[in-house]
Image (cartoon, rainbow, N blue to C red):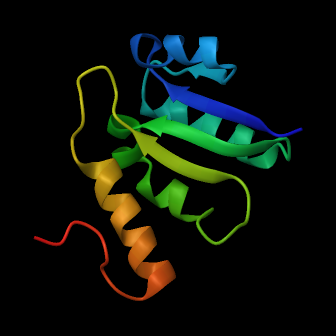
């Protein structure tokens, strides 16, 4: 059975333990980078959520995994709320998969 990982600062990730996620606290972006690569190499993780403030800094590291079937690396808002980065990444992924921008048309 696959695991779901969560990387971020304590206040942002601790609640995900109640959902059964494997929570990994990172005090800064460098610690998050180490955790990201460690979890991505572990074939038990299908999804890795990472808080947006770290994901922005680790964009190049995350891009290394975008063409692999697992893990899916998804940005989520942190304790300070959404920066819009995670949503923009979902939009790009949908455009890439579908070939057109089908989300958020006004």
| Residue in the picture at 23% in, 23% down | 80
Residue 95, image quadrant: bottom left
Report the label total.
0
Q: Is residue 81 above or below residue 1?
A: above
Give percent across and percent down for residue 73: 57, 50
Q: Which residue sits furthest bottom?
A: 99
Residue 47, image quadrant: top right
Q: Is residue 58 above or below residue 100?
A: above
Q: Is residue 80 left or right of residue 58?
A: left
| Residue in the picture at 22% in, 66% down | 104
Q: Which residue sits furthest right?
A: 1
Q: Quadrant of the C terminus?
A: bottom left
| Residue in the picture at 54% in, 29% down | 7
| Residue in the picture at 24% in, 28% down | 81
Q: Is residue 95 left or right of residue 44?
A: left
Q: In this view, does 100 lie above or below 71?
A: below
- In the image shown, does 38 or 87 lie closer to the viewer? 87
Q: Quadrant of the N terminus?
A: top right
Give percent across and percent down for residue 49: 54, 38
Q: Which residue sits furthest front?
A: 106
Residue 90, image quadrant: bottom left
Give percent across and percent down for residue 35: 63, 33
- In the image shown, does 97 or 53 lie closer to the viewer? 97
Give percent across and percent down for residue 78: 34, 27
Q: In this view, does 54 lie to the left or right of 22?
A: left
- In the image shown, does 101 or 37 lie closer to the viewer? 101
């Amino acid at each position: 059975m696959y695991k779901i990982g969560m990387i971020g600062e304590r206040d942002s990730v601790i609640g995900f333990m109640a959902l059964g996620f494997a929570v990994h606290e990172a005090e800064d972006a460098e610690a998050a980078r180490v955790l990201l690569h460690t979890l991505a190499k572990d074939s038990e993780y299908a999804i890795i959520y990472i808080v947006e403030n770290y994901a922005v800094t680790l964009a190049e590291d995350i891009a290394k995994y975008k063409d692999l079937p697992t893990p899916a690396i998804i940005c989520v808002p942190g304790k300070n709320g959404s920066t819009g980065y995670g949503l923009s990444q979902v939009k790009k992924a949908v455009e890439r998969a579908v070939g057109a921008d089908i989300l958020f048309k006004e």
